[in-house]
């Protein structure tokens, strides 16, 4: 059973996140140099998992396969993955080599490695890679994690979040 105090702490943590319902407006470049807005992919009726990575991030290189697995399992149903390289467009070739090396099957965009850009994702200061942002099908930011995340952890998070927010949903 979740205590009243725990609910208040959780609510206090979520209030800043609720301001981002509908998805953030952040223009980044794709690997062809075309401007793309991340709100093209967030808040479009599917869960969206945005993973910020860098080509030289040790954890990213070890764990990104989980995002391929999550994307493959959900892309035709209820969720997508959007990758965001923070290598900057001048290091596009290194970022592209990362995508190719890991055979990433989800869309990846390139961000400049600037705090202001990454803070637009809505979870406060950017700490490092990998960072995961989880948005509801309506585009509300409901989760963020710095560090490795597995496919199973994402599956469980979405399942539990959905169960707890449904009318008559169970309490933890």
Image (tube, rainbow, N blue to C red):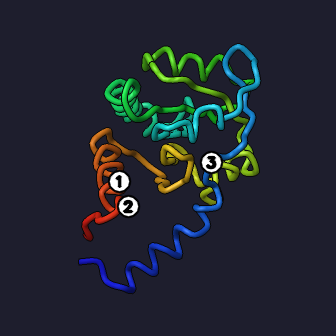
* SS at mark 1 in the image: helix
Whether residue 4 appears in this view of the structure is: yes
Q: Is residue 75 toward the left or the right of residue 120 in the image?
A: left
- Does 59 appear above or below 172? above
Residue 75 point in image, percent of width and height: 40, 26
Residue furthest front in the image: 167
Q: Which residue is mark 1?
A: 162
Residue furthest bottom in the image: 5
Q: Which residue is mark 3?
A: 22
- Does 109 appear above or below 60? above
- Pick the front one: 115 or 124: 124
Whether residue 131 appears in this view of the structure is: no
- Pick the front one: 120 or 93: 120
Q: Is residue 15 toward the left or the right of residue 31 in the image?
A: left
Q: Which mark is residue 92?
A: none
Residue 6 point in image, percent of width and height: 38, 80
Q: Is residue 66 toward the left or the right of residue 37 in the image?
A: left
Residue visible at 23% across and 77% down in the picture: 1
Residue visible at 38% across and 24% down in the picture: 76
* Mark-to-mark CA distance, 3 and 2: 17 Å
Residue 16 point in image, percent of width and height: 61, 67
- Does 88 appear above or below 170? above
Residue visible at 46% across and 16% down in the picture: 101
The disc, 3 or 2, on the residue closer to the chain's N-terminal end is: 3
């Amino acid at each position: 059973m979740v205590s009243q105090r725990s609910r208040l702490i959780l609510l206090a943590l979520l209030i800043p996140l609720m301001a981002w319902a509908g998805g953030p407006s952040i223009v980044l470049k794709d690997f062809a140099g075309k401007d793309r807005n991340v709100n093209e992919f967030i808040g479009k009726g599917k869960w969206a998992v945005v993973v910020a990575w860098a080509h030289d991030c040790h954890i990213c290189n070890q764990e990104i396969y989980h995002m391929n697995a999550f994307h493959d399992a959900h892309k035709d149903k209820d969720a997508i993955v959007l990758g965001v390289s923070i290598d900057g467009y001048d290091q596009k070739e290194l970022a592209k080599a990362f995508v190719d090396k890991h055979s990433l099957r989800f869309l990846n965009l390139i961000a400049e490695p600037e705090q202001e850009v990454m803070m637009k994702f809505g979870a406060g200061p950017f700490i490092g890679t990998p960072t995961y942002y989880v948005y509801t099908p309506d585009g509300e930011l409901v989760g963020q994690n710095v560090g490795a995340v597995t496919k199973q952890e994402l599956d469980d998070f979405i399942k539990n979040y959905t169960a707890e927010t449904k009318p008559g949903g169970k309490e933890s």
